Amino acid sequence: MGRERELARLRTLLRSSRLLTLTGPGGVGKTRLAVELAGGVRGGRAGRAQLVELDGLHDGELLPQTVAAALGVRERAGRAGSEALVHALEKRSTLLLLDNCEHLAEPCAALAAALLTRCPGLRILATSREPLRVPGEVVFRVGILSLPPAPAGAGGDQHGDQAIDPLLRSEAVRLFLERARTCDAGFAPTPGDVRTVAEICRRLDGLPLAIELAAGRTASLRPAGILRGLDDQLSLLTDGSRTGPGRHRELGTTIDWSHRLLDPLERTVFRRLSVLAGGFDAESAAAVCADRGPADERAGGGDHCGDGRCRVRRSQVLPVLCALEAKSLIVRVPGDAAGTARFRQLAAIRAYGTDRLAEAGELAAVWDRAMDRLAGQAADGAAMVFPDGAALPLAREQENLAATVARAAERSDPRHTALALALARLHYQQEQLTAARALLTEVLARTTYGSPDHGAALALAARAACQQADRQAALTFAREAVAVERAGLTHPGRLANALDALAAAHLCRGAHHEAVAVFAECLAVVRTLDRPLDVAVCRHHLAWALLQTGDTAQAAAVMEECLPALESGAQPGQAAAALHTAGAIHLAQGNWDAAESRFAEVLVKVPDGESLHALYPVEGLAIVAAERGAPERALRLYSAADAARRRTDTEPEASWRGKVEAAAARARERLHPARADAAMTAGRRLRGERLLSYAVRGNASADCLTKHAEHTDVACQTSTEPISPSAQLPLTARELTVSQLVAEGMTNQQIAAQLGLSKSTVASHLDRVRDKLGVRSRTQIAVLVAGRADGPGPGDEPA
């Protein structure tokens, strides 16, 4: 609100500057302005916008890994840290928004300089209380909101309603009134109230956060009461702000006054929340803020408050969160897919809360509860047989987990190893391998040989070393992990995890027969645990290793045993990998229809056309097309996958790569060089959903796959008969035409140009198609309208 002029100016600066830094005091609105500016980026020179929040990061050495994790950049091909970032960004047009740089000014400056020097398509938008001082940096100071004119004199109130018009044009007053109505839907200010609001905004120097905090009190106070409270507080605080530069005491004053107006229970919860820098939901807030002991769970009784201290019951925390949100002392952030509400404290407010927590003598106790909460969640993950690749309950708590790991390390807390191991697993799953191995080195140094955490850390270190192609280290770690677990004999699941890591290390070295032997032993151990899904996971790993040895029949038999369980109960990534293995086995057997069906099933499941889970089946479909005599389709799919692998810096296993390259070579031999080159060029233009749509377009089991994607139980039968969309789909002629062009990989803009429609009309047609067919993605539309089983056709060439 009220930033129209700034946004216009910033858009101009962003077009001509590669590093634009928004500066200003805490609470002036730098982050909101930057997010609004970046949100308006839609390609072009600035490129796609990516937000990296740095508020919770305190170790500058981890800055490159933090930025890489936020961007989804993985450490591959031996590249780590800033090198991985450079490789990912050097050929892309990207706008990188680094938010809250002031506490990491030097590391941010160094990283910005390095990236801008080597990535010509990169632009950086930063927010900081001070400039980064990088050559070429353009600094834009974010000012306060426009203030209302000062009253002409004591008789100003006699002007009546006419006198408030200039006040309502003030940005600060407009912000206060809007936030007040959010807190109290019945707020109807009188002219006198508006003049009081104008005075409040002047006292707060037009600082947006301070104005919002004051406006949050309108549910319980009239504007005159808010103004009196601020006047009293300003007379008490004559020194600088406790949470920011002295030149802006108004923010500290407003936070302090808002805090004083809280009741004792609200104050207690407010300050305890400050340890959760990464945000919190109601459950984690209750675990950290509620006091321990049977008395704390009683349904009745008082709050046991005295001297500003309260004993907090778990049932009280959620209502207090709602009250704090209404007062703008916490803010809501998007929750997870299940709709769980999540909150956080803004940096300045959290710093104030931490001060109050220390003053109350509760800092150590509250941190202790936070560590217990996260350590308990870490233990839930560690109890899995194969925890290193599983979806972990701490994935949303990574920032809080990193903070507790640092605190536990400083104090030699015994919970450090479990917390650090959980954080290392998250880094490993994000392919931030250097950070993972650094944590694991610390865990191994702090744990005794033979302890459960020691063996688990060795197994994870082996997997991370495999990912980095550090083959000898991987084998050494894995062998030691197995030795530790054999000697300890504490739990068969931990031995199975170590054996799985050892087999992976053998696969990494190309020692496939050794891998088969170890996977077989791992399977025998897991069978004793009565965990059917883990047995299926282990069988899948064994089937893949058997396939690498050439024992296709045995691989197929093992895969047949485990695939139903993985399709119905495994995580999406595990299920996709299993379907790919099944497809690869059918390829080795020469069963092209079954292979095509399995590969297409993977593509219906995955949401991203450039994920690892999508690239393997796209390559598999290229092999199928080459074998079936559709060389142009084979080259398009091969070229699309190859371009995606170059962009994502991934390399498949040598044996699979050999099969893909051989299929592409056969396809080239069947075409005139000009047609082959045209097919390769067309393939490089296919990416994302366009690639997925094109890849599944010719699948013979499209109808079955769509039912599978809609989670209905159906036995898939392959068929070479083409599907007739017009006979099966309840679409108008225009909707069917648009859907068929989607299946050919066209974008909405290209469809609009071909049919002489507007882009919005095409989008409307597709919305109706999705509603009629009950699907969500373009890929599923392409599956349903697939019109033939194989072979190229006149519409094959993507526009």
Image (cartoon, rainbow, N blue to C red):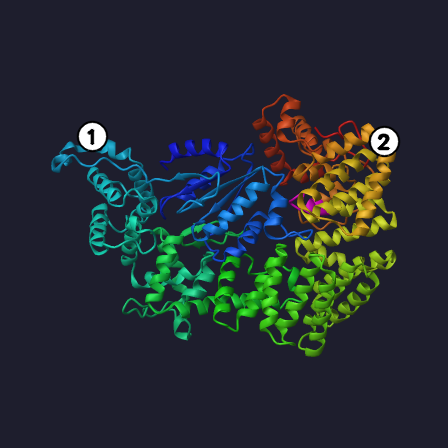
Element class at badge 2: loop
Provide the residue designation for mark 1: 162
Residue 190 spot, x, y in % from top left? 22, 39
Quarter holding residue 445:
bottom right
Amino acid carrying label 1: it is Gln
Work out whether residue 131 can be spotted: yes
Residue 556 spot, x, y in % from top left? 83, 56
Q: CA distance from mark 1 to mark 2?
A: 81 Å
Provide the residue designation for mark 2: 671
Element class at badge 1: helix
Quadrant for the N terminus, please.
top left
Residue span colored magenta: 602-610
Please indicate whether residue 763 sits to the left or right of residue 588 in the image. left
Quadrant for the C terminus, please.
top right
Dot 1 or dot 2: first in sequence order is 1
Count of numbered marks: 2
Please rate how many residues cluster around mark 1, counting C-alpha atoms within 10 Å: few if below 14, some from 14 to 19, many from 20: few
Work out whether residue 718 can be spotted: no
Q: At x 56% / y 45%, what residue is drawn?
A: 114
Please indicate whether residue 44 sits to the left or right of residue 168 in the image. right
